[in-house]
Image: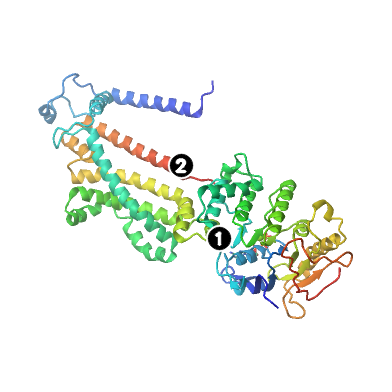
């Protein structure tokens, strides 16, 4: 039987996963099953020679617990994983769409006008390489609000790829297509809407996809700094609690959400893709 | 002498050369007049500047010197009065064939309803034989000839005063080409449209044109001759070859392409005026000045009348 490439790849992935989990499980020292270690024991390193990385089975149990009740809220330091991710997504998406709302029109302007391109280029070149977290102190000082500061950091990190890709895509629209717009006497706005936007859309979407990836990377670090809520804070909090099982679980969740975001944007990118 | 509908005056085009070298002068001091309702073909070797002239007529490109005047107004940019079939089709690849036409029709008739726009577009797509689902496909899913037909439908559907056609039938098989040529003539004859068409096909030019402009090789190309085709219309492909003038005209064109396009290249007209020499045949048969078109102007601009050489 010749299975399709997809089916075989899926099978291989499953095998790899099983092997990795098997090795991990085998390498983890057996824990006292059933009873959790007390915090005291952990602090003294009493039970184990050294606090060990929990085995995958423990992570699965944790995941099951958390995911079966993702939205519970038991005070500031004890919220469900769903709530934490919700906070993070809220910050990422609001900062991100704010950035898109500015970057895409600005990118259009820069792409359509060689003058603007040159005038703004030095600013972009200097601002772009700055680590988004470097803005944090300034943001906290100016905005005086940790929530808004986190959103600002997302905003600043996601604006550049979108801005640059939009400008690049718009500037690179084939002259033939612009000529089609010109011969049909489309005004500037109509030309932008009917010709340039669809022509540049694949490049713009690529920028948007890069941006959302960066934003999701940055939010974890930003929330570790800002604290309070969010998946980044959750990881840090569980580390402070020395709950490594939760840390690993949340790492996996970060990866999963990041993948879903990327998949969603890849899907959108396919919608606007065209073949010449 | 009244200025013709379309008048090209002292047109030159130079492109900056590659760094350090001299600019490339594609053509220089081109003068022409085209009457309203006239069907003019232009023939010349590849690279002589035909598309460049057409783009300037369209208003997409600017001449280095000279001007194009249409309807008494200088052409200073593209307009819906001048429809173009581009040499490379220039369809928008993200739109279906139908949408490529509807957007043009919508641009032309801003107050039409969606239904009107749709029906009008479908009519023209049917005219070029794009039906039965083909019109819903994207250009990348169409053959070269089908794309060319979409582009023809788009230009015809906006019913411009001046149709500028850049090798519009180049990618079509003989049968399709024939039927679209007939369709073009039908549309043209039933309107007061003027057509300026680039072609490499001598027979096509004789079949369609009132007048054939012959361009010498570039650089420094010029429109050296203007051959009047006084074969009465309607012209039928199978019969036209029996017309007494047919082979005289054909031989003249072929000889121009084979020999004179090179010999005359870069040369000024002897008398210093660079208007094309008017060539007219008809010594072997009846001279027919009137086309079957209603307008039926007989442009009186025969400066030099050569016999068949
Ligand atoms: N943008 C440009 N920059 C420099 N040179 C150009 C440019 N566009 C055209 N040319 C030159 O101008 C000349 C005429 O080009 P054009 O496209 O008008 O030729 P053509 O007569 O339409 O040829 P064909 O029959 O092959 O389509 C060519 O030598 C070409 O190299
Ligand atoms: Mg050409």
Q: Quadrant of residue A20?
A: top left
Q: Position of residue B51 (x, y in %)?
A: 64, 62
Tell which residue pokes out farthest to the bottom in this image. B271
Chain letter behind tag 2:
A
- Residue A1 visible here: yes
Q: Is residue A52 above or below residue B102?
A: above
Residue occupying the point 42% across, 47% down: A206
Left or right of B259? Residue A219 is left
Residue occupying the point 88% across, 60% down: B244
Callout 1: few (<14), some (14-19), or many (20+) C-alpha neighbours within 10 Å? many
Tell me: is circle 2 under 8 Å from ligand 1.
no
Left or right of A270? Residue A57 is left
Q: Is residue B167 above or below residue A45?
A: below
Give the residue number, with chain letter if any, for mark 2: A270
Q: Quadrant of residue A169?
A: bottom left
Q: Secondary structure at mark 1?
A: helix
Q: Secondary structure at mark 2?
A: helix
Q: Quadrant of residue A209?
A: top left
User: Mark 1 or mark 2, which has the lower sequence index?
Assistant: 1
Q: Disc number at residue B218?
A: none
Q: CA distance from mark 1 to mark 2?
A: 30 Å
Tell which residue pokes out farthest to the right in this image. B284
- Residue B94 visible here: no
Residue occupying the point 88% across, 67% down: B283
Q: Disc number at residue A183?
A: 1
Q: Position of residue A110 (x, y in %)?
A: 40, 61
> Disc 1, disc 2: CB below 8 Å?
no
Image-quarter location of ligand 1: bottom right
């Amino acid at each position: 039987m010749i299975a399709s490439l997809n089916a075989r790849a899926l099978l291989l992935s499953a095998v790899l996963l099983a092997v990795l989990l098997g090795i991990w499980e085998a390498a983890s020292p057996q824990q006292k099953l059933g009873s959790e270690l007390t915090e005291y024991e952990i602090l003294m390193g009493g039970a184990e020679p050294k606090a060990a990385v929990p085995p995958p089975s423990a992570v699965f149990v944790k995941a099951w617990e958390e995911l079966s009740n993702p939205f519970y809220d038991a005070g500031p330091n004890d919220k469900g994983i769903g709530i934490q991710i919700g906070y993070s997504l809220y910050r990422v998406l609001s900062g991100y769409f704010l950035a898109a709302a500015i970057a895409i029109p600005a990118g259009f302007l820069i792409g359509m006008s060689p003058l603007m391109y040159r005038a703004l280029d030095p600013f972009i070149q200097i601002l772009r390489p700055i680590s988004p977290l470097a803005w944090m102190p300034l943001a906290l000082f100016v905005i005086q609000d940790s929530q808004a500061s986190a959103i600002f950091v997302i905003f600043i990190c996601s604006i550049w790829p979108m801005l640059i890709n939009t400008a690049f895509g718009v500037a690179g629209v084939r002259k033939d297509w612009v000529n089609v717009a010109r011969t049909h006497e489309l005004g500037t706005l109509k030309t932008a809407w009917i010709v340039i936007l669809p022509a540049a859309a694949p490049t713009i979407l690529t920028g948007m996809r890069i941006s959302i990836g960066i934003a999701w990377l940055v939010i974890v670090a930003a929330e570790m700094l800002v604290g309070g809520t969010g998946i980044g804070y959750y990881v840090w909090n569980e580390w402070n609690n020395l709950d490594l099982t939760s840390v690993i679980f949340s790492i996996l969740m970060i990866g999963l959400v990041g993948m879903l975001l990327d998949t969603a944007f890849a899907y959108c990118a396919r919608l606007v893709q065209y073949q010449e | 002498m009244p200025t013709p509908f379309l008048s090209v005056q002292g047109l030159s085009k130079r492109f900056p050369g590659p760094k350090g070298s001299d600019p490339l002068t594609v053509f220089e001091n081109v003068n022409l007049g085209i009457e309203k309702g006239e069907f003019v073909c232009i023939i010349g070797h590849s690279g002589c500047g035909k598309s460049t002239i057409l783009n300037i007529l369209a208003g997409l490109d600017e001449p280095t010197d000279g001007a194009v005047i249409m309807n008494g107004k200088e052409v200073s940019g593209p307009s819906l009065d001048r429809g173009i079939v581009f040499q490379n089709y220039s369809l928008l690849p993200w739109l279906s064939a139908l949408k490529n036409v509807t957007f043009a029709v919508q641009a032309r008739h801003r107050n039409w309803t969606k239904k009107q726009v749709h029906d009008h577009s479908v009519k023209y797509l049917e005219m070029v034989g794009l039906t039965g689902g083909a019109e819903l496909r994207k250009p990348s899913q169409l053959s070269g000839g089908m794309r060319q037909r979409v582009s023809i439908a788009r230009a015809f559907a906006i019913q411009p005063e001046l149709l500028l056609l850049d090798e519009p039938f180049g990618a079509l098989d003989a049968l399709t080409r024939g039927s679209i040529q007939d369709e073009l003539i039908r549309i043209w004859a039933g309107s007061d449209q003027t057509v300026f068409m680039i072609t490499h096909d001598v027979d096509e030019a004789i079949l369609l044109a009132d007048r054939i402009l012959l361009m010498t090789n570039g650089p420094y190309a010029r429109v050296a001759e203007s051959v009047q085709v006084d074969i009465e219309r309607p012209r039928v492909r199978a019969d036209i070859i029996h017309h007494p003038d047919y082979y005289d005209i054909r031989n003249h064109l072929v000889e121009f392409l084979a020999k004179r396009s090179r010999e005359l290249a870069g040369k000024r007209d002897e008398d210093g005026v660079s208007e094309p020499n008017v060539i007219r045949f008809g010594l072997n048969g009846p001279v027919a000045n009137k086309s079957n078109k209603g307008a039926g102007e007989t442009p009186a601009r025969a400066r030099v009348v050569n016999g068949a050489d």
